[in-house]
Image (tube, rainbow, N blue to C red):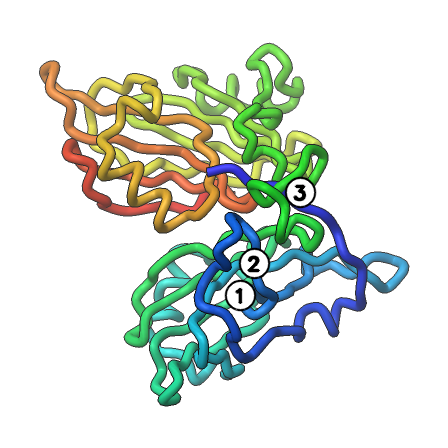
Amino acid sequence: MKTRISLSRASYVLLAATIITSCNKNDLSSSGDRLSTSNTIAVAASSTVSTSGSTDSVYLIQPCKRGDKRDSVAQSALPTTIGTYLTANYNGAMFRKAFALKNSASVVTGYVVVVYYNDKPVGLQFDSAGTFVKVLEQREKGDLDAPGGFHHGGRFEERDGEHRDTVALNSLPVGVMAYLASNYATDTLMKVFQNRDGSFVVLSKNNGLYATVFTSIATFVKRDQLPTERGSIQAVELTGVPSTAANYLSTTYPNYVVEKAFSFSEGGTVKGYVVFIDANNTKYAVEFDAAGNFLRAKTIH
């Protein structure tokens, strides 16, 4: 659930196209978090090229077995279910690259799709039918073999659980506070986060749970109602959420960071949970029922 990272420089075109198509080792090597390069896909850390013509890179962690390979495929060749999923969960994202995952017999076992959402790379793995499997973990090149896979000051330093992205409610920009007071005066503010791009995400409750997004200069972007059941909303620790839910998060969002968790109760009985997480600098709200079974997820920013 924690990871760190370093930066490598190369041209955007080369980084976005560079991949390792064959796998020479079985999954992760036996030495802890060490990864063979065959288990990674290099992509640009942003879709924006710097003025110098170069950009940082990150590596998507997609372990594969000996003899497996990745073949580039066109977006039009992907199962329609993948396109439907991307539209529903990453609307407005820029498609960058896709691969068919094949076993040693050249049978397609799944797909990996790379998109840029809010100018950040997101790697998604699907099964052969195009059903979503998981969000691929990202690491910086220098941290591929580092303990935990991250370093302080790196792109993914929040994985150490220190929550440096948390903003005190009384430290919100005046423009954000003014907008909320004018448009959502009855909201109760629960938590505020500032992303690496300077944008703000405000969690609040008002007969439901909401995430309101603002730019770094306090301009309103959007307001999402998080997927929740109606009822009394209570902040809880992840330890208060069923282990089934925690296991789902670990499998589906490797090295995710818990930002905030909530329970929803009616008549004193818990009806479900929502866990607000950060996965590779993209935030998600993931809903579970009272037993911790996954219900749905919403991509926030």
Q: Specify the amino acid type for callout 2.
A: Leu
Point out the tag, 3 or 1, that comes first from the N-terminus.
1
Q: CA distance from mark 3 to mark 1?
A: 20 Å
Dot 2 surroundings within 10 Å: few (below 14), some, or many (20 or more)? many
The local secondary structure at tag 1 comes to: helix
At horizontal 49% and vertical 77% (from top left) the residue drawn is: 99
The local secondary structure at tag 2 comes to: loop
Single out the residue that lies furthest toward the front.
30
Residue 156 in view: yes
Q: Which mark is residue 155?
A: 3
Q: Quadrant of residue 64?
A: bottom left
Q: Quadrant of residue 100?
A: bottom left
Relative image position of residue 72 (x, y in whole percent): 53, 82
The residue where tag 2 is placed is 35
Q: CA distance from mark 1 to mark 2?
A: 6 Å
- In the displayed structure image, the side of residue 265 where residue 92 appears, left or right: right
- In the displayed structure image, the side of residue 123 where residue 276 appears, left or right: left
At horizontal 45% and vertical 76% (from top left) the residue drawn is: 66
- State whether residue 128 is above or below residue 148: below
The local secondary structure at tag 3 comes to: loop
The residue where tag 1 is placed is 39
Q: Are marks 1 and 2 in contact (CB under 8 Å)?
A: yes
